[in-house]
Image (cartoon, grey):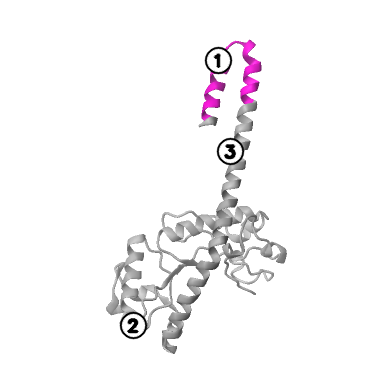
Amino acid sequence: MLTLTLCAALAAANSISPSGHPEQQQLLDQLAAAELRAHQAAQDVGGLRARLAAARLPAHEAALDATVRGLLDQMTVPEKARQLDIWRTADMLTNGRVNLTKAKAQWGDLSGGVGVLHDVYPYPQLGNEIMAALINASRLKIPPLIGGEATHGLQMDDHTIFPSPISLAATWDVDLMKRYGQTVGSEARACGTHITWSPVLGLCREPRWGRCEEMMGEDTHLAAVRPSNSPPQACFACIMSV
């Protein structure tokens, strides 16, 4: 509001005679000071939010750890094995809708749960249908993870496509890469995708390998650099090697 008021005053000053120039400079100085205070306030808010999240983290992690341990104690060996596998989502869909009869024919007893579904890019309604069907069919009600490719953007209609990772690596701008990752992550989560097999922080030093375009370059230092203001738990990547 202060910035808008100063802008309005500055516009008014611009319409008066040359004798008003000192007033214009004063308003410009006030505007610059107000923008500086707003920038500092935004940084302060961001820092406080990070500290609050860090303060809450131990209690959250303790509760999560207790839940996971309780589930592991209840799980049979076959149920644990099914959680470690990746399942083809097409095996449970017919004309874009959930078909549990088809899924049982392909995957067997669904009461043992399903770990990760791959290569499905659902819109929210289908994502919710998949989750609800498999949770209700499982004994322990463990939700599956829906995963998809997002090497340079979520690879489905209506989503942002970015340059390939090897091109992003050439910028050496890790904060830009962070913004790219946040955009891909928010778009993926909005449509029901939980995990993507990217960014890939493996090193590509053999140009004859067919997946070099998925790598963030060949430099160990670049692969290890963390974007500014990023807590350790905020960075999660896929590792591949040649």
State which quarter of the image contains the C terminus: bottom right
Q: Examine the structure image and report whether residue 26 is included in the region drawn in magenta.
A: yes
Left or right: 185 with respect to 26?
Answer: left
Residue occupied by mark 1: 15
Q: Nearer the viewer, mark 2 or mark 3?
A: 3
Amino acid of disc 1:
Ser
Label 2, secondary structure: give it: helix
Q: Earlier in the sequence, mark 1 or mark 2?
A: 1
Q: Nearer the viewer, residue 115 or 170?
A: 115
Q: Residue at x 71, y 66 (%)?
A: 220
Q: Earlier in the sequence, mark 2 or mark 3?
A: 3
Where's residue 97, x and y in %? 29, 68
Where's residue 132, x and y in %? 32, 70
> Label for residue 111?
2
Give the residues in magenta: 4-28
Label 3, secondary structure: give it: helix
